[in-house]
């Protein structure tokens, strides 16, 4: 009898230990699908010789690497001031950066060196719920189609781990590229809801401009870029805000940029030929960002059809079978039952290093591309008083500020715009909107809630988004308490005076010919 009791107790203990795993395998009844976060470019460190004594981080470079690069460049920069020997400075710059990051390049077939990779681990914790995400790490240098295969394996793992038949995806920036490749290659049956946050679904002009060597330095764009990233939200950011303005209005930025223009004149071809093209111009993740209007030109400049045929084939496959078929892929996902939310930021100065600086953006991705097709006025302008919505579907898709026509989007009913949203910069208020969408039992759209209309104003200091208008018929605008943040006080008390001072300084710069 004692043996029988001991056996039964042991069996009970074993069953209790296996219960969580068995429960996950049989299914989870929590009602909340697990969410997978497909992160942006640079989401995971890239290593050379990982797991060995020679291991080092190639990207993102650590402080000691950056100090080493500066230490190698600085002597040549000092000599440049006296000798005007741009060739020597260029050699030092190329050698330093290539030594630190050159091993990241892909070969002619679009493959990484075998000793360069990321460190990947599958999650083991089955707990999940609202405001919890499983982070999908990946090597952003590689072919997005190859990475999509890894995402498929990750999704299957999370399903088995949590006991759910479907997952949600929240794709940020390049994560949208990977997600589009996943939809195209593996279908949508495992996906319940998908949020595309600031994703280059149709590319981004900065990638095309860089690979086409269309560079431009502009002092005002540089100021707007810095102050857009660091508005007066607290004491630290306010100090940076005024520092940026001091550098601009004092003329110091113009002096530096005049030197930068001289460097571009002297070294642009050399730096591209010896560093940018042979290293960064081989990365398939970058090629997936290039929009249709510059893709073939960029290929002709950077890729050799004889020595890089395999790499070109992979780049072409993503571009022509995924990016150029975005409408077919997205609408197919909707028809299959996937609930899709596309979110694009606007009214942020884009990267001030390329010719497309007037394209309205979230600071990195053009609004017209992140929204998958919106008609967008150039930054600082409007579509015009006589402008009429291009696609008349019975809804008003013109932004209240007259800058965006969302009717031309691939999914106009499922595309939101957040004014003042910096690229992939999310706060609790934006996450609340994502949760409202992902964890609903309904297929929500831009007319479903007066709190989340198609056009929203980002109020980051108070961690909320405020509807700008375009409410559904019969809906009333929600009431919001007056903001009481540092930024609100700055806008109310300091900004009127500061803006008048800056207007005066703008006139002074204009008279000085700056």
Image: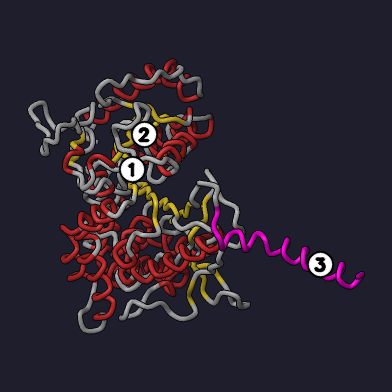
Nearer mark to the viewer, of 3 and 1: 3
In front: 505, or 422? 422
Cα distance in 3D space between marks 2 and 1? 38 Å
Vertical arrangement, residue 71 with respect to residue 503, above or below: below
Q: In the image as oriented, which residue stretches furthest toward the bottom? A: 306
Vertical arrangement, residue 455 with respect to residue 36, above or below: above
Judged from the image, the secondary structure of the residue bearing numbered disc 3 is: helix
Judged from the image, the secondary structure of the residue bearing numbered disc 1 is: strand
Secondary structure that dominates the magenta span: helix
Nearer mark to the viewer, of 2 and 1: 1
Residue at horizontal 20 percent and vertical 57 percent from the top: 328
Nearer mark to the viewer, of 3 and 2: 3
Q: Position of residue 427 (x, y in %)?
A: 47, 38
Q: Which residue is mark 1?
A: 343
Residue 25 covered by magenta stretch: yes
Q: Position of residue 340 (x, y in %)?
A: 33, 47
Residue 398, image quadrant: top left
Q: Which range of residues does the magenta coloring cover?
A: 1-28
Q: In the image as oriented, which residue stretches furthest toward the front? A: 1
Cα distance in 3D space between marks 3 and 2? 83 Å
Label 1, residues with CA under 10 Å away: few <14, some 14-19, many ≥20: many
* Comes first in the chain, label 3 or label 2: 3
In front: 313, or 270? 313
Residue at horizontal 18 percent and vertical 59 percent from the top: 292
Q: Which residue is mark 2?
A: 250
Q: In the image as oriented, which residue stretches furthest toward the left? A: 386
């Amino acid at each position: 009898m004692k043996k029988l009791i001991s056996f039964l107790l042991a069996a009970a203990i074993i069953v209790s230990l296996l219960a969580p795993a068995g429960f996950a395998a049989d299914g989870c009844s929590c009602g909340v699908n697990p969410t997978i976060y497909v992160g942006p470019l640079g989401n995971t460190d890239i290593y050379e010789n990982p797991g060995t004594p020679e291991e080092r981080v190639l990207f993102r470079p650590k402080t000691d690497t950056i100090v080493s690069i500066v230490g190698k460049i600085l002597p040549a920069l000092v000599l440049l001031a006296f000798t005007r020997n741009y060739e020597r400075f260029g050699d030092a710059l190329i050698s330093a950066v290539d030594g630190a990051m050159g091993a990241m390049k892909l070969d002619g077939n679009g493959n990484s060196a075998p000793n360069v990779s990321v460190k990947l681990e599958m999650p083991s914790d089955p707990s999940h719920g609202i405001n919890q995400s499983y982070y999908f790490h990946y090597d952003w240098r590689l072919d997005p189609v190859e990475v999509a295969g890894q995402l498929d394996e990750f999704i299957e793992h999370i399903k088995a781990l949590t006991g759910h038949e479907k997952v949600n995806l929240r794709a940020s920036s390049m994560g949208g590229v990977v997600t589009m490749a996943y939809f195209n290659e593996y279908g949508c049956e495992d996906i319940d809801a998908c949020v595309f946050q600031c994703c280059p679904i149709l590319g981004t002009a900065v990638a095309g401009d860089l690979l086409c060597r269309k560079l431009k330095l502009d002092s005002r764009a540089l100021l707007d870029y810095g102050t857009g990233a660091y508005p007066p939200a607290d004491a630290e950011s306010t100090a940076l805000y005024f520092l940026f303005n001091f550098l601009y209005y004092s003329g110091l930025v113009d002096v530096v940029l005049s030197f930068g223009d001289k460097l571009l004149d002297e070294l642009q071809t050399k730096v591209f030929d010896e560093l940018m093209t042979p290293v960064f111009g081989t990365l398939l993740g970058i090629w997936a960002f290039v929009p249709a209007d510059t893709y073939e030109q960029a290929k002709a400049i950077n890729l050799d059809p004889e020595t890089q045929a395999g790499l070109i084939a992979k780049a072409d496959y993503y571009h022509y079978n995924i990016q150029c078929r975005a409408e077919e892929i997205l609408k197919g996902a909707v028809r299959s039952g996937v609930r899709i939310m596309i979110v694009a930021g606007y009214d942020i100065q884009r990267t001030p290093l390329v010719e497309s600086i007037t394209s309205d953006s979230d600071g990195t991705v053009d609004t017209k591309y992140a929204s998958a097709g919106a008609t967008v006025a150039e930054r600082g302008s409007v579509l015009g008083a006589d402008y009429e919505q291009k696609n008349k579907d019975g809804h008003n898709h013109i932004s209240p500020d007259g800058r965006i026509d969302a009717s031309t989007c691939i999914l106009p009913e499922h595309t939101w715009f957040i004014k003042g949203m910096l690229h992939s910069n999310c706060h609790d208020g934006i996450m609340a909107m994502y949760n409202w969408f992902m964890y609903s039992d309904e297929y929500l759209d831009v007319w479903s809630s007066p709190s989340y209309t198609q056009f929203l104003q980002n109020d980051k200091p108070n961690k909320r988004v405020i509807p700008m208008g375009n409410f559904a018929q019969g809906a009333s605008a929600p009431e919001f308490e007056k903001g009481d943040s540092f930024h609100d006080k700055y806008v109310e008390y300091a900004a009127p005076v500061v803006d008048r001072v800056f207007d005066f300084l703008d006139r002074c710069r204009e008279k000085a010919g700056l």
